Image (tube, rainbow, N blue to C red):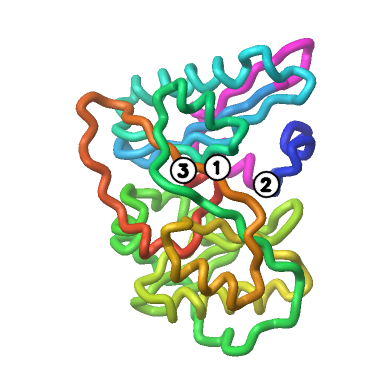
Amino acid sequence: MRLKEAAGWNQTEADWRNLLTLAPDGCFGIDCDGELRATTTAVCFGQRLAWIGMVLTQHEYQRRGFARRLMEHALEYLRRRSVAWIKLDATDMGAPLYDRLGFREEGRIERWIRPRAVVPDGAASAGPFVPDAALDREAFGADRWRLLEVLAGIESAAVLGAGFAMGRPGANAAYFGPCVARSEEAARNLVAWFLCRHPDEDVCWDILAANTAAVNIARQFGFERKRELSRMAVSGTSPAPAFQKNDRLVFAAAGFEFG
């Protein structure tokens, strides 16, 4: 948490604990001078995909190669597990390291923020969460149902047969996501559901830039784009099978640490 707070990131202690629960063997750190100085996490979604996140180094210990050492260790760990594809969301500062490690950009992901505001109308059309593993796999491209089970227990809702969304507390703003939906209308209802539950909080939302429908909804609800990261991928096996996903169904990511 000390490293995360120094970086100004939105994750909470619960997010760290969820990572440790989902990937007990995939969370790595470097101790130096008696303290934890750098971290990296790697969550596996079966053997099809792994997601790297929480690449953090204490400011005073940067430029010592800690991040590279942890990334190399994480990649070796994932390749031993024969994970086909490895992805992450890279800041401008981190992208050159990932490029040297073989990652290539596959798109952009944007963080949008909405200051606390008036509750929107029409928020009652979302109902209780109903699992739809097939829809999520079609959208995300891998089986992340263990992650969704964890997040659904925090805050979740669905538009029956059309999509679902989740949310969780954040250190700086309530977090909306993931959200997977078959239509723009269903996604809009799910966004309204979440905003109705958090009228007195800032809300953040991570959107794939290629999903113009999600961008349009964000603007309609008063969100503003604050950051842009590069979504990058590298193969973990050779040859790696083609990765099939559908970004048009992904209206909100699960977080930079989860994908």
Q: For the residue marked with disc 3, what is the amino acid? A: Arg
Check disc 3: other Cα within 10 Å, few if <14, some if 14-19, many if 20+.
many
Q: Which residue is mark 2?
A: 11
- Which residue corresponds to mark 3? 231
**Place of residue 36 in the rendered image (x, y in percent of width and height, measured from the top left):** 72, 21
Q: In this rendering, would 194 be left or right of 172? A: left
User: Which portion, as a residue range, is magenta?
Assistant: 15-37
Magenta stretch: includes residue 29: yes
Badge 2 vs badge 1, beta-carbon distance below 8 Å: yes
Does the magenta segment cover residue 16?
A: yes
Mark closest to the chain's N terminus, 3 or 1: 3
Q: Nearer the viewer, mark 3 or mark 1?
A: 3
Depth check: give the residue in front, 76 or 215. Answer: 215
Q: Nearer the viewer, residue 81 or 150?
A: 81
| Residue 112 shown left or right of residue 190 in the figure | right
Give the residue displayed 50% in from the left and 77% down from the top: 188
User: In 3D space, how far apart are the residues under numbered discs 3 and 1 (Cα atoms)?
Assistant: 12 Å
**Location of residue 208 in the rendering, given as x and y in whole percent from the top left corner:** 47, 56
User: To which quarter of the image does residue 4 belong?
Assistant: top right
CA separation, marks 3 and 2?
19 Å
| Element class at badge 2 | loop
Residue 163's spot in the image, x, y percent?
Answer: 40, 71
Look at mark 1 in the image and give the residue it sits on. Answer: 257
Q: Nearer the viewer, mark 3 or mark 2?
A: 3
